[in-house]
Each structure stands twice: as structure tokens, then as C-alpha cells.
Image (cartoon, helix red, strand yellow):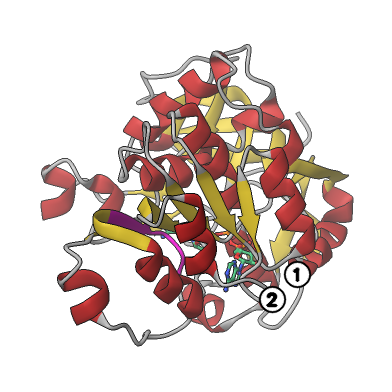
Amino acid sequence: MCKKMKAVVKDKPGKGAVLKEVDIPNCGPEQVLVEVESTSICGTDLHIYEWNNWAQQNIKVPQIMGHELAGKVIEKGERVENVEIGDFISAETHIPCGHCYQCKTGKRHICNDMKILGVHTDGVFAKYAVINKVDVWENDDSIPPEFASLQEPMGNAIDTISAGNVAGKNILITGAGPVGLLAIAVARAFGAAIIIVSEINDYRKELAEKMGADIVVDPTSSNLENVVMDNTNGIGVDFAAEMSGNENALKHSLKSITSGGSMAVLGLPDGSVDLNLTDDVVFKGIDLHGITGRKMFNTWYTAKRLLKEELVDLSPLITHTFSLEDFEKGMKLMEEGNCGKIILKP
Ligand code: NAD
């Protein structure tokens, strides 16, 4: 096998990244080497590409970008027992320490010393990538690689929607970015009754409808609480999933929930937010859940079953497919927000 491969590398601080020839990574004793068939761009990759404050503090250059993938195992380390050469896999991106209080009490997705694939390690926007054995997820062969690579963000959506026990409930999702769009499909599959989605971008409003939203509201032209009340007999939604990271969306979401309802927050506001905790959370008896990543590996089992049994259709979500060479076209579309998920093919 040739010893070099093409990879998208964050080569220096500042905006941008380059496609360059790099060494194929060595597979350690507790790692597998994967031939990547499909990868997808995540908001985190965009942050690294744009070199925002978070990226400046967390990324050590040079580093191969990317963390969502599907591919075939072509080599495995001597201490890897859970997977065979030729297996079709994807990867969890949390790399937990395995020793801290959280890891030892069944919560390794919130490990105290968490490392992340493609953030603290070289990533998967490449022809080949190494994955730690703890993160290997064996895919069902019937799932197309493009869908299989979306199981990681789908896990975010599954974790968030699971917090609401949404079967038969009326729900609100604020933010129809890629994860919010996945959440619509998941909520539909979980049996939600009315799914109201709030989104400000026209392209994504249309995608929200295609993914199964019943009502799509633009909070810049309609009053979200009024729309929610009009469509829930004046009761409000039972559950809200905040997936925009926008402070106003968070505030209006809380006001749209019926007393005794619940909310899960996945979106990450830039800084602290100003909430009326007394009126909007405490006196309403709202259950508030913070969501970090996805549970290892509960959400992966759910994602696999939903995809294998075709209970969700991710086709409308995949709006663009580019070769690795054209990764900048994908980053530009992500910046504009005129896309769902963007697939990169090595
Ligand atoms: P994204 O930024 O692509 O999507 C956010 C969407 O919210 C966009 O479509 C945007 O138009 C919309 N939006 C902005 N302001 C709005 C408003 N006032 N009302 C309604 N919609 C509004 O992000 P994504 O990749 O889909 O991820 C969703 C959020 O979750 C982001 O904040 C992201 O940082 C965060 N995230 C958190 C975790 C975690 O572990 N907690 C994991 C993944 C993503």
C-alpha cells in the first residue's frame, strides 16, 4: 500500500485549511485503520476551519480535520478484539479516559478528561483514519455509508429527543440546523404528535418540512408563543428541544412549554444567557436537561435500528456531496447555512 494519502489539514492558525499529502497514520495496538468511504461536515469542523475563539483554545495545528465517518477496517492492532478486518464501521467521537468518576459510573460520554476525535486527535477527512477500539461502532451492512456517517450527529438528536419521552406529545424544536433536522426525523419516529419547528433560514425551513415538521415558524416574522398556543389548544408544548444556540430561541422556547413540561438544551450559546428562572423554569416546574454529545452507546443502537428498519429517511437531509478536493465548497455552504448535511468523499 502507498504510504501517503490526501487529507484536509488545519495546517496553521487563522481561517482556512488545506488539502495535502500526508503520511497514512500508524495503527496502534488498540486502534484500527479504516479506509474512509464517507465523511460529513459538522459545525465543529466549520469552527475549526473559521478558527473561532473555541478553536484557537482547543486545536493544536497541524491536524487532520473531521470526525463523522463510515468505512472499512483494513488493519487492526494486536489488542483489538471487537472488530475484524473488512468490517463496516463508524466511530463514536468521544474518547473517554475510562478512569474518572463519570466513566466508572456509566456516564463516560461526560468523562472529566474527555478527548474528541478530530479535535484532540487527527480526524477523518482523509483516505484513511485511525480509530481507537473503544470508539468502534459496527454498522449494519444494509445502511448506506452516507447515512452511517450521520449516526454521530443523529446520536445528539436521539439523546435530546429521548429526554422528552415524546410519544403522543406536542413538541417544539428551535433551530433546524443539521442536528435540529435530524431531531425532527427522530421525534417523528418516536411517535411525537405535533412537531413545531422554529427556524430563521429559508433553506432550512423548507428542509424542516421535508424532514417531517408539521408547522414551521419563522420567529422573525411570527410570534412563536402565539403559534404554539394556537396549535396546542392554548396549552403549550409538552417538550421543547433547543437546537439553535440562540438566546432568544431559548427564552421563547421556555415560554412555549406547558407547566410541568420539559426541555432539553443541546444548542450552545456563545456566552452566558439572561433567563427568568423564577417565572419560566421554577414556578412552571420545568424539567431542564443539558445534553452533551451522545450516550455511549445507547444512542448508537437506536440510530442503527432506526436506519436499518427505515424508520427515518435521511435522504432529504443530505443536500450536497463533494470530493475531499472540494471541501472548501462545503465549508462555504456551511457558512451561508444554505445546506443540510454535506458529505465529503475521499
Ligand atoms: P447550526 O448552527 O448549523 O444550526 C443552528 C440553526 O439554528 C441554524 O439553522 C440557524 O438558522 C437556527 N437559528 C438561529 N437563530 C435562531 C432563532 N432565534 N430561532 C430559531 N432558529 C434559529 O448547528 P447544528 O450543527 O445543527 O447544531 C445545533 C446546536 O447544537 C449548535 O448550537 C451547536 O453548537 C450545538 N451542538 C451541541 C452539541 C452538544 O454536545 N451539546 C453537539 C453538537 C452541536
Image quadrant where residue 98 sits: top left
Image quadrant where residue 20 sits: bottom right
Kindly report which numbered mark, 2 or 1, lies closer to the viewer in this rendering.
1
Q: Quadrant of the N terminus?
A: top right
As drawn, 90 above or below 157: above
> Does residue 81 appear left or right of residue 149 in this picture?
left
- Along the line of sight, the residue nearer the viewer: 96 or 30: 96
> Does residue 288 appear left or right of residue 174 in this picture?
left
Would residue 244 be seen by someone viewing this image from the given angle? no
Beta carbon of the mark 1 residue lies under 8 A of ligand 1:
no
- Residue that label 1 marks: 335
As drawn, 226 above or below 278: above
Residue 149 at x, y = what percent? 62, 35
The kind of residue tagged 2 is Glu
Residue sitting at x 75%, y 37%: 316
* Ligand 1 lies in quarter: bottom right
